Amino acid sequence: MLCEMCEEGEVDDAMALLSQMEALGVRPYSISYSYLITRLADAGRTLEADAILQEMLISGCKPKIRLLNAMLTSCLKKGLLELSEKVLIAIDDLGLHRNRKTFEILIDYHVSSGRLNDTWLVIAEMKRKGYYPNSYVYSKIIEIYRDNGMWKKAMAVMGEIREMGLAMDRRIYSSIIDTFARYGELGEALELFEKMQKDGIKPDINTWNSLIRWHCKYGDSGGALGLFGRMQEEGIYPDPKIFVTIISTLGEQGKWDVIRKNFENMKVRGQQKSGAIYAVLVDIYGQYGKFQNAEDCVMALKSEGVELSRSVFCVLADAYAQQGLCEQVVKVLQLMEAEGMEMNLIMLNVLINAFAIAGRDTEALSVYHHILESGISPDVVTYSTLMKAFLWAKKFDQVPKIYSEMEASGCSPDRKAREMLKSALIALEQRH
């Protein structure tokens, strides 16, 4: 019954049943423990998952590597490095061998956190264990080079891929397309995008989002809208995250008529739920001022049948953050928790950004301290966003301090962080 409850997503009921079983002195089977731990981990309820895992180990049940990989993923998503280290130790103590998936989980975390040296250490260990880089690992290598401003090295990886005789798949194509686009080489990015499709590889939502985002970034809103329309024509469900980029870009240019036309096109295509999110975001950005309250916004989405996922909450929080509406960001986070979703580092980074935009650097710093006190490991986004808060508040002396903390934590500063440090140092020199 525990397994059935977990499969149906009734995790709280499964937890209640487990408590009743333990009160009667009955222990679940190993598979029941595994189902429950996996569901808790997937839901971001990492500490509860760890507690059940400890019960499982005490009962004498031996977890499989797949279960411990799920725990490792959950720990790293929450930035709980000490707990993730305990999971790795458990893998070794139980005589289980770290498999390719284990190494890929670690690589993904270090790349996302901007930890260049740690990424290479994991890849080196992976090779020693007989697991050679595949397309997933190569795509991550491209990303870590790209994010550290080493885009020519990222391009050089293509040569190594060819030498290995590895086929260019969706992951590798997407990573290289994003690298070209990020550095303003939009023509090359589009050319590779077309080649990708000629090779019979269908771009996923991430590839489309990347091209749209960077076209907006470099001022080509027409190209971005063309890609947005083409994506929908090819049957790709729009990601709400990209709505923020499009609406903010067009809004800054005063093109509210184009924004409305986009909304009408989405309704014509029958994308009712996407259209509802799009309309709410337009209001948040101030065109109509209808949804300046987060609670009204969430109620409107529910009334349209929109499933309130962590991704949707993140988009709403980011939209309010871009407007510097800090209290509404906090409300979104509270509403998310009320829906049973735990806070993660991404959402806390959004909150820091909201305070930065509003010029409230003291509150931004408080969130950073909360992250540290919670045992969560900040990533490169955390540090660079906090640097932005101090830079905008003209507290230039604080920027080098945060930069040093970033380096000490093992995060490799990205190009954005390096540019902010340079700006702060110039401002400090001019003061003297």
Image: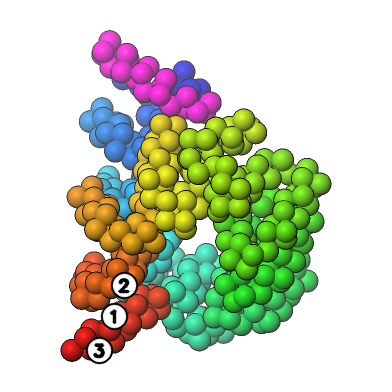
Q: Is residue 18 above or below residue 31?
A: above
- Magenta-colored span: 6-25
- Would you name the residue on which mark 1 appears? 424
Q: Who's the residue at 26% across and 13% down the image?
A: 23
What is the number of the mark on residue 114? none
Q: Amino acid at mark 1?
A: Ala
Taking the image as shown, residue 152 lies to the left or right of residue 165, namely left
Residue at figure coordinates x 20%, y 76% from the top left: 397
Mark 3 or 2, closer to the camera: 3
Residue at label 3? 430
Q: Earlier in the sequence, mark 3 or mark 2?
A: 2
Crowding around mark 3 (Cα neighbors within 10 Å: few <14, some 14 to 19, many 20+) is: few
Residues at badges 1 and 2 in contact (C-beta under 8 Å)?
yes
The x and y percentages for residue 113 are 36, 64
Q: Is residue 193 above or below residue 258?
A: below
* Horizontal side of residue 324 vs 50, given as left or right: right
Q: Secondary structure at mark 1?
A: helix
Q: Residue at x 72, y 40 (%)?
A: 272
